[in-house]
Image (spheres, rainbow, N blue to C red):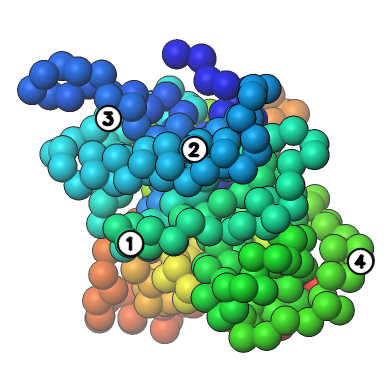
Amino acid sequence: MRGTNSENIVSKINSSVFFKEFTFSKNDFKELDTNQQLEFADNVVWLDDLFFIFQIKERENGASSDEKWFDSKIKNKAVKQIKSTLKYISKYPEIFIENVKGHKLDITKAKANTNVKKIIIYSTNEDFPEELRNQKFYESKDVSLIHLFHSEDYYWICKYLITPTEINEYLNFRENLFRFDKLSSSVLPEQYFLAHFLETPEADHFDARYIDNLKNNDIKIQEFNISDLIENFNKNIKLINHQTEYYPIIQEIAKLNRSELIEFKKRLSLSIEKSESEELITPYRIYLPRTDCGFVFIPLHSSRSVHWQNALSNYTMAHKYDAKAKKCIGLVIFRDEKQLDYFELFWQYIEDDWQFDAEIEKLLKENFPFRVVKTKMVNNRYKM
């Protein structure tokens, strides 16, 4: 079934920000007992502990007033559809829906997430009343707060915030500021909320001066843009068992905020550059306590490329152990000897609880293979 223009636009935005692997827009499914076709949410984003459910509405020309349309299509129909989706997830043992990559996953596994974001996005005519557009939430007794966004406002939020983690943080902030003062929140435009968030996540006050953040905000996207890497990710990893095997790796990358992505990209670029050196280069690494995940980047000259598997396995395990991390991702990079314009990138993902290991302790003490990790404090990543 082809979606409306608004549904297609939101799907395009979501697959760009949240990545195609975690965006689902072909969401109808069949009830197991009756074989009846059931309508799931218009769009779903599921990224580990991030779970967003979207209903999308488009204002069509008609006799009804904007107020009646808003009450009927947004506060009534869209809200009921979100409730139905949550009911389906709770009721059925499995529901397979297809992501933008064409892979089918069981969305009921997302039911473990306790902080589901319910979102209604709508498109309207240009003269849509501001008092309606400024209504930021529908308060439901059954499913708590449901976010309401005009499609233009949602577009600009995604344009400024860029990453799934930052958008999730903004939605949390938006709920907190609304609860702090519901009356004021319902008369302020979305631009104020975004400008406030760019200044501070503290949701216990209002300050008109914050609106200048939207005028002065210079988004240096290239510093943390890794869209080309993500778009071609499945071409740069050797799949062993199934087509979604690389998802845990891309999932950890997708969780990064912009300051973390800047550090990720710096090390990736350095590794590509240093792989030209015939000297043995000490790997670059980072560890993120927020996600309990380490990354290690291993530049390798093509003359040593036959040893890439040992290098990747040993360095990834060593960094995981040294950082006492639950998860670690390793990346080894070297130039393709047959196609000199290309680099080979091989990845490894390890996840298990950290345990003391006397042998690894001894090896790291005798021959520590890394640079010292430095802690970098960022007061406000939106004003770097």
User: Given the image, on which type of amino acid does mark 4 rest?
Assistant: Asn
| In the rendered image, the vertical position of residue 358 relative to residue 68, given as above or below | below
Query: Neighbour class for label 1 at 10 Å: few (<14), some, many (≥20)?
Result: few
- Report helix, strand or loop for mark 3: strand
Q: Nearer the viewer, mark 3 or mark 2?
A: 2
Q: Which mark is residue 216?
A: 4
Query: Neighbour class for label 2 at 10 Å: few (<14), some, many (≥20)?
Result: some
Between the residue at mark 3 and the residue at mark 2, the CA separation in whole angstroms equals 30 Å
> Which residue is denoted by mark 1 in the rendering?
141
134 and 116: which is toward the camera: 134
Query: Neighbour class for label 3 at 10 Å: few (<14), some, many (≥20)?
Result: some
Which of the 4 image quadrants contains residue 92?
top left
User: Given the image, on which type of amino acid does mark 3 rest?
Assistant: Phe
> Which residue is denoted by mark 3 in the rendering?
96
Between the residue at mark 1 and the residue at mark 2, the CA separation in whole angstroms equals 18 Å
Q: Please state the horizontal and vertical placement of residue 230, each as a whole percent of the image.
A: 59, 39
For the N terminus, the quadrant is top left
Q: Please state the horizontal and vertical placement of residue 370, each as a whole percent of the image.
A: 55, 73
Task: Please state if 348 lies on the left or on the right of 94 as rendered.
Answer: right
Q: Nearer the viewer, mark 1 or mark 4?
A: 1
